[in-house]
Image: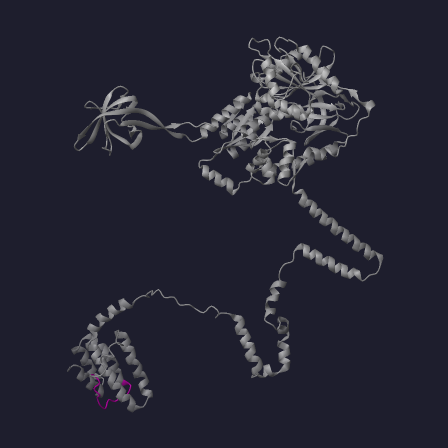
């Protein structure tokens, strides 16, 4: 207590004694004395002492949180001291000096406590309470309204009181409106007008401008505008109706039709099932079915061929211009029943030798002179099920159909299909029962089966002619031809040769060195070399004509099959052709047809829908097999494409991404590389450059000559893509004869293997009274005292089942294993 006293006395007289205080006291006191040293310099005199220690030591302890703030607080009263009166300053200054002394004494213990307080207070604390701010506070329109209201009636400023200034500033305010609802109007006015509204406004303003004139010209213009409007409305209505009209070719699959109508394939199949027609998703529909299904879904059908042929309205031929023509006869029937052999004998040429595998894969058209001197045109159609479309085309262009049935076989599915095609086309049928020279032949059985198909032959009291023949020996072939000529005579077939030729494309191909060749059957008129021909979506000039034996001819009349050279593409089999007088017109119509075909292909493309994605996810391991198909003739390409697409299953989809006629080119290999596809060539080979590119890009090229092989190999490839199925296989059974309990091991069963083999690694089941009690693994398998890898039938063994001891005498132990089984397509 004695130490601070001399410090106060020294401050009264001179600043010199202040130097003694820091020597005697600690450093903490020096800082407290700093304000006391400055007081005498400011000119203050201390007259007396006021003892305030007893009342306010605790109160002022808190402000002295740190040494620096104590200095700042002491500096401020010293600076302001000289400005105030001397009397007041003397009494106030006494108190800080005393407080400073006490702070200096308690400096060290106070610092420790304050630091802990700082740590506790440091950082914000989250209490979990939320402060909700008023939502309507930032609204500006209300503030503007209150300002206007307060300024208007107040009139405090001279500018507001002056009426002239109010008019000057209020010009824009008058346009803004006086009511509450007027503020939303500019939003409506700023909306953009559509082109129709703009055109309508322009027309209305023009009408107002011209209505004042009372001349006839204004009325005429008004009438013209009204007519124009009506035409535009009619055009819009027609466009809406045309969107509901499907432009299709004659042969469209169920899937393509469903995609055009934007409906599910199942809906189309269901509608056909409702009328008793069973179809698959890749099956082609004829014209009648297409119209029926489209009408049910509210669509119209416009066939592309009909649309273009409407422009060629042929005049009816006069009776005197008509001349007799040869009958066109189509030979139809099941595969290997002897259709081509029959034609072979009639033509006295070996046609079969030219066909791979001895089966017909093209429509062959032949002109044959028979023993009577008359000519008959024969069409040989394939019997394989893949060539349905070919048989349908053959039935459409023919006059008479010969249905060949083998006497040693039966009426097969393709035979029934051929009969239905002929009946649908309204073509008279002649039945030829072939192979009667064989010992196992039974013609009566064939006639009985035909009667079940509503085909009653003359021998059975019907009206359909029938002839038993042998194509191998030539038995009764002439009698069959006589019946064909008799049927033709009854039909009274005539045609006008003195006009431009028209007919049907039977087949089309790309011949190296010659270009596109197509087999055409002339049904009316005469074709000459140099004529302009339009066939489907292609046109060209007839450069040359060949008969079926390859001889050049210059003129071809009705019922004559010819090979045409000169078209700029390969038309589809079944397309109609016509000779045009003007080449330019032929090219224009061909371009129009090509555009329609492109539109149809775009519309028929299947779009990926959410349902399809969901179905693929549900299947899980969904795969696609992309195929590029090239063939020698259009009909074979079409038939093979249909057959391959029918192989599509729920897990693997076959996509024919490109199909065309001609050899395999480099562009095909590049397309296969881009789309990860395999190239299938049917009776065609790749070019040298394409083969090199395929080896470089590692693209697989498969080449076939028989349609069976192509379909079977693609099926095998698809089966290889299927994930293997895990199947349980029973390996052996053993009967428990005795049980033994061994400590630390469990129950051991003494067994006799009654069937198969039990191996150490097999899973086992314990079966008691026909009920599975436990399924698990073998713990051990022993024969006598030795561990055994396997125990076969008839031997005894001891076994222990892991984690199972409830084994009883009479139980059966069944050993099984999970094996991978290769899956096959249904």
In the displayed structure, would residue 692 be above or below residue 125?
above
Residue range of the region highlighted in magenta in the rendering: 40-53
Question: Does the stretch in magenta take in 120?
Answer: no
- Depth check: 504 or 631 in front? 504
Can you say which quadrant of the picture contains the N terminus? bottom left
* Residue 8, picture quadrant: bottom left
Predominant SS along the magenta part: loop
- Depth check: 491 or 226 in front? 491
Residue 41's x, y, as percent?
Answer: 27, 85
In the displayed structure, would residue 209 be above or below residue 400?
below
Residue 40 visible in the picture:
no
* Residue 36, picture quadrant: bottom left
Residue 286's x, y, as percent?
Answer: 63, 30
Q: Residue at x 18, y 80 (%)?
A: 21
In the displayed structure, would residue 146 be above or below residue 517?
below
Residue 395's x, y, as percent?
Answer: 66, 24
- Depth check: 819 or 537 in front? 819
Q: Which residue is most to the left?
A: 2
Residue 95's x, y, as percent?
Answer: 24, 84
Q: Is residue 228 left or right of residue 442?
A: right
Q: Which residue is most to the front?
A: 461
- Depth check: 170 or 99 in front? 170
In the displayed structure, would residue 370 be above or below residue 241?
above
Q: Is residue 715 left or right of residue 426?
A: left
């Amino acid at each position: 207590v004695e130490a601070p006293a001399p410090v106060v006395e020294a401050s009264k007289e001179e600043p010199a004694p202040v130097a003694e205080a820091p020597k005697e006291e600690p450093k903490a006191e020096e800082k407290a004395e700093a304000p006391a040293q400055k007081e005498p310099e400011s000119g203050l005199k201390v007259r007396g002492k006021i003892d305030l220690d007893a009342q306010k030591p605790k109160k002022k302890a808190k402000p002295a949180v740190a040494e620096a703030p104590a200095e700042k607080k002491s500096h401020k009263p010293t600076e302001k001291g000289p400005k105030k009166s001397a009397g007041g300053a003397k009494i106030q200054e006494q108190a800080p000096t005393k407080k400073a002394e006490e702070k200096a004494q308690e400096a060290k213990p106070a610092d420790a406590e304050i630091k802990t307080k700082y740590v506790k207070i440091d950082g914000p604390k989250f209490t979990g309470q939320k402060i909700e701010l008023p939502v309507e506070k930032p609204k500006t329109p209300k503030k503007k309204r209150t300002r206007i209201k307060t300024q208007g009636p107040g009139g405090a400023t001279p500018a507001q009181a002056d009426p002239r200034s109010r008019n000057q500033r209020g010009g824009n305010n008058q346009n803004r409106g006086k009511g509450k609802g007027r503020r939303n109007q500019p939003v409506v006015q700023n909306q953009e007008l559509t082109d129709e509204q703009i055109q309508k406004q322009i027309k209305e303003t023009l009408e107002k401008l011209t209505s004042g004139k009372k001349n006839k010209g204004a009325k005429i213009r008004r009438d013209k505008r009204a007519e124009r409007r009506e035409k535009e409305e009619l055009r819009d209505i027609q466009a809406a109706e045309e969107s509901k009209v499907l432009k299709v070719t004659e042969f469209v699959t169920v899937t393509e039709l469903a995609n055009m109508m934007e409906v599910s394939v199942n809906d189309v199949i269901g509608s056909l099932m409702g009328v008793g027609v069973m179809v698959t998703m890749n099956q082609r529909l004829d014209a009648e079915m297409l119209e029926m299904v489209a009408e049910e879904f509210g669509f119209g059908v416009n066939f592309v061929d009909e649309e273009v042929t409407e422009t060629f309205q042929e005049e009816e031929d006069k009776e005197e211009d008509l001349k007799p023509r040869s009958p066109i006869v189509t030979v139809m029937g099941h595969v290997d029943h002897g259709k081509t052999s029959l034609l072979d004998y009639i033509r006295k040429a070996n046609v079969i030798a030219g066909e791979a595998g001895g089966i017909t894969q093209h429509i062959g058209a032949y002109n044959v002179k028979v023993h009577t001197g008359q000519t008959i045109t024969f069409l040989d159609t394939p019997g394989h099920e893949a060539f349905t479309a070919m048989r349908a085309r053959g039935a459409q262009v023919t006059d008479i159909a010969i249905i060949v049935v083998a006497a040693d076989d039966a009426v097969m599915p393709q035979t029934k299909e051929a009969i239905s095609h002929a009946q649908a086309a309204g073509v008279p049928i002649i039945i030829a029962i072939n192979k009667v020279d064989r010992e196992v032949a039974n013609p009566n059985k064939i006639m009985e089966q035909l009667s079940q198909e509503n085909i009653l032959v003359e021998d059975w009291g019907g009206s359909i002619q029938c002839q038993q023949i042998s194509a191998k020996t030539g038995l009764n072939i002439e009698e069959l031809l006589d019946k064909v000529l008799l049927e033709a005579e009854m039909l009274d077939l005539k045609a006008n040769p003195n006009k431009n030729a028209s007919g049907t494309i039977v087949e089309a191909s790309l011949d190296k060195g010659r270009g596109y060749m197509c087999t055409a059957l002339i049904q009316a008129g005469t074709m000459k070399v140099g004529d302009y021909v339009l066939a489907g979506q292609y046109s060209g000039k007839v450069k040359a004509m060949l008969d079926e034996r390859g001889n050049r001819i210059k003129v071809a009349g009705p019922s004559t099959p010819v090979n045409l050279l000169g078209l700029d593409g390969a038309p589809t089999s079944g397309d109609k052709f016509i000779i045009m007088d003007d080449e330019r017109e032929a090219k224009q119509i061909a371009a129009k047809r090509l555009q329609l075909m492109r539109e149809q292909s775009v519309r028929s493309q299947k779009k990926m829908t959410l349902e399809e994605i969901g179905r693929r996810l549900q299947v899980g391991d969904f795969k696609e097999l992309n195929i590029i198909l090239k063939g020698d003739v259009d009909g074979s390409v079409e038939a093979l494409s249909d057959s391959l697409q029918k192989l599509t299953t729920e897990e693997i989809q076959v996509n024919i991404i490109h199909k065309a006629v001609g050899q395999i080119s480099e562009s095909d290999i590049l397309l296969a590389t881009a789309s990860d596809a395999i190239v299938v060539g049917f009776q065609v080979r790749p070019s040298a450059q394409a083969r090199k590119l395929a080896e470089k890009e590692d693209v697989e090229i498969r080449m076939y000559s028989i349609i069976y092989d192509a379909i079977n190999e693609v099926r095998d490839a698809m089966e290889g893509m299927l994930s293997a199925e895990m199947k349980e296989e029973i390996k052996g059974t053993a009967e428990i004869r005795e049980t033994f309990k061994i400590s630390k091991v469990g129950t051991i069963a003494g067994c006799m293997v009654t069937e198969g083999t039990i191996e150490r690694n097999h899973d086992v089941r314990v079966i008691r009274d026909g009920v599975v009690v436990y399924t698990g693994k073998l713990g051990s398998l022993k024969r006598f005292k030795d561990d055994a890898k396997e125990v076969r039938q008839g031997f005894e063994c001891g076994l222990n089942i892991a984690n199972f001891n409830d084994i009883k005498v009479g139980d059966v132990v069944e050993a099984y294993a999970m094996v991978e089984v290769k899956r096959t397509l249904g």
